[in-house]
Amino acid sequence: MAGTTGTTGVVVVGCGPTGLLLAGDLAAAGVPVTVLEKRPRGISNLTRAFALHARTLEQLDMRGLADELEALGHPLTRLGLFDGLTLDLSVLPTRFAHVLVIPQYEVERVLERRAREAGAEFRYDTEVTGLTQDASGVTVRARGMEPLRAAYVVGADGMRSAVREAVGLPFPGRSVIRSVVLADVRLAEDPPGLLTAGTVGDAFALLIPFGDGYHRVIGWHRAHDVSDDAPLDLAEIKDIVRLALGRDFGMHDPRWLSRFHSDERQAPTYRAGRVFLAGDAAHVHSPAGGQGMNTGLQDAANLSWKLAAVLSGRAGPALLDSYDTERHPVGRTVLRSSGTLIRLAMANRPWTKAARAVLTSLVTHFPALRRKAMHQVTGLGYAYGRGLTGRRAPDIRLPGGTRLYEALRAGDFVLLTQTPWPDTRRSHLTTSEWPGPQTLLIRPDGYMAWTAKSPTPTALEAALLEHVGPPD
């Protein structure tokens, strides 16, 4: 197209965790990808997310990144919610039976390095101002560069997404909680635990360590409802923490203070033609349960292999419809569950306090409810279909000492069979013999695409043709 700087496979707008994982996956699959970020180059330590849950860690393990991040963070096996309700994550059926407390900027650092090493191009100080699309591609306009042409665009540019606005998608919802205060401070006294949280009366506070001598403080007081731009000082932070936790731990030397409000919003669809939304551009919700960054990373894991398959010719464009079909319901469920948690935590009326007490009792005394709650918060329980198809594939131990998630690091489908599959014409298929009762075809994102007990060669070939594509 005249007047453009050229073409690329995919333009990813936004350099947060979601955009970085997506860019790294695409580049590793050989897809030309350009990342546009309106911020100057460099990863900010002014971060809000601090938790990687089990399913996200499994996704990162499929990329060879989980062990590095585990070494940088702090595992927490017991997740406290309210009224003494605690989830024991150590019983989860995964290598990562914990929540990993780690600042978002550490996750971004690792993901950006991977994307760069795989060949992704980054352009900073580049703010998207609009885009147009037609049957063959998308033209992206941004300050500081000539228009850029791409086959597809992914908006991973946050709650105030320029991409979402450009395609005219609404972002319905409302604010859940206003005037939450944030601060990064040093403490003169050590808190009693890795995460220190408390609610007393109308005050709530949470302390989370960065690992560099600073702690993130998150606080809220029901009676002090002011706008996000209202002045904030350390004295207000201390007052809230003393009310909620009993003391302020001698906090001093703040390097950052801010207010924000928490919204519940979701785009009606995550796709508009050749443009997709992921992460906070597609959905935002309360911080309860620490699911925000995790949901965005799993959006990226779902979308990346599908874009790569379509752009390589292994799959038709209809495959891309499944991104919205699969991820939109997950986003809606996270919106509801995190909203329920925050409302129960904020309960101040007799009937809401009674409802919280009942829920606490049910989850405490009924193992099935407790298991469902843990699997939902950690992401292990989400599935993209009924039966085995669409379910999370466990990290099966394979002959030779390797694991399924290690086999998935190639970014390809993995076929697990009782007997060797002699057709090696599909370079994007990894085959492994295993002693299981069924033949399993695992998608690149670690979910089951197809299962069968002792399939005939004809049936197996038909399944491979449908899900993996034709031979090379």
Image: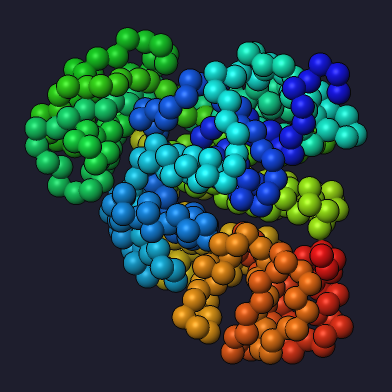
Residue 100 left/right relative to 184: right
Colour scheme of the picture: rainbow
Q: Position of residue 305 (x, y in %)?
A: 68, 53
Q: Nearer the viewer, residue 180 or 107?
A: 107
Percent of width and height locating residue 356: 39, 49
**Image vertical order of residue 50 relative to residue 467, above or below:** above
Asked whether residue 240 is in view, the answer is: no
Measured as percent of width and height from the top left, residue 431 is found at 66, 76
How many numbered discs?
0
Between 27 and 196, the residue placed more toward the observer is: 27
| Picture coordinates of residue 413, whole percent (x, y) | 68, 66
Query: For residue 5, what is the image quadrant?
Result: top right
Which residue lies at the image location 15% right of the left edge and 47% below the top edge?
A: 192
Q: Is 390 left or right of 134, judged from the image as shown? A: left
299 w.r.t. 444: above or below? above
Residue 309 shows up from this direction: yes
The C terminus is located in which quarter? Answer: bottom right
Please indicate whether residue 271 sits to the left or right of residue 437 in the image. right
User: Relative to 248, does residue 387 appear above or below in the rendering?
Assistant: below
Q: Locate the N terminus by quadrant.
A: top right
For image coordinates 54% across by 23% down, the residue present is 124
**In the image, residue 14 above or below residue 87:** above
Q: Residue at x 45, y 39 (%)?
A: 108
Q: Tell me which residue sits at (62%, 80%) in the image.
A: 432
